[in-house]
Image (spheres, grey):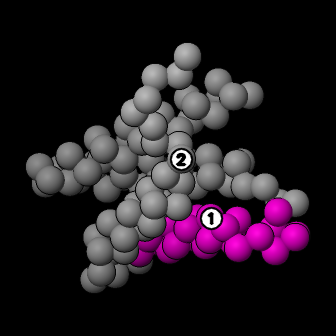
Amino acid sequence: MNKIRSILYTLATVLIIVGALFIIQDNTYGILILVLGLVLNMVYRAINIDFKKIELFHWFEFIKLGSIIFMAVACLSFMLELEQKFNLLILSIIIDLIVNMKEISFKKKA
């Protein structure tokens, strides 16, 4: 299961980066790729939420859940063609990175 999680996270990250690059080049498929990456990222985050901690009212798990909900709002803003869709997208990715900072590691695991 851990391999599937790491593959899902890597695929979501690659799709987000590739989608952003396509958007920069004014390619119409960029938004679709980016939203697909965000959806995969939300699935990955939902798999990793500890629901027992949510039942015990641990605030950090509520913040993680809020991050997922905010990312869903950012995806919906693209479908609804809201004016601030790119701002919501950037903000949701930054919040996701801050909340899940422990998954980003530049150290080699022994």
Q: Secondary structure at mark 1?
A: helix
Q: Is residue 49 left or right of residue 38?
A: right
Residue that sits furthest to the top in the current view = 110
Residue 4, which numbered label?
none
Q: Position of residue 40 (x, y in %)?
A: 54, 47
- Residue found at the very far bottom of the displayed protein: 83
Q: Is residue 86 above or below residue 93?
A: below
Q: CA–CA distance between discs 1 and 2?
A: 13 Å
**Percent of width and height locating residue 54:** 81, 68
* Depth check, front residue: 102 or 94: 102
Identify which residue is drawn at 64% across, 34% down: 5
SS assignment for the magenta stretch, majority: helix
Locate residue 66 relative to residue 2 in the image: left or right: left
| Crowd class of label 2 (few under 14; some 14 to 19; many from 20; radius 10 Å) | few
Nearer to us in this view, 79 or 95: 95
The structure residue drawn at horizontal position 40% and vertical position 33%, both measured from the top left corner, is 106
Is-magenta flag for residue 72?
A: yes
- Residue under label 2: 102
* Residue in the picture at 45% in, 61% down: 98
What amino acid is at disc 2?
Lys
Front residue (pair 72, 50): 50
Q: Amino acid at mark 1?
A: Lys
Q: Where does the magenta region start and end? A: 53-77
Question: Would you name the residue on which mark 1 appears?
Answer: 64
Q: Is residue 80 above or below residue 34?
A: below
Q: Residue at x 56, y 35 (%)?
A: 8
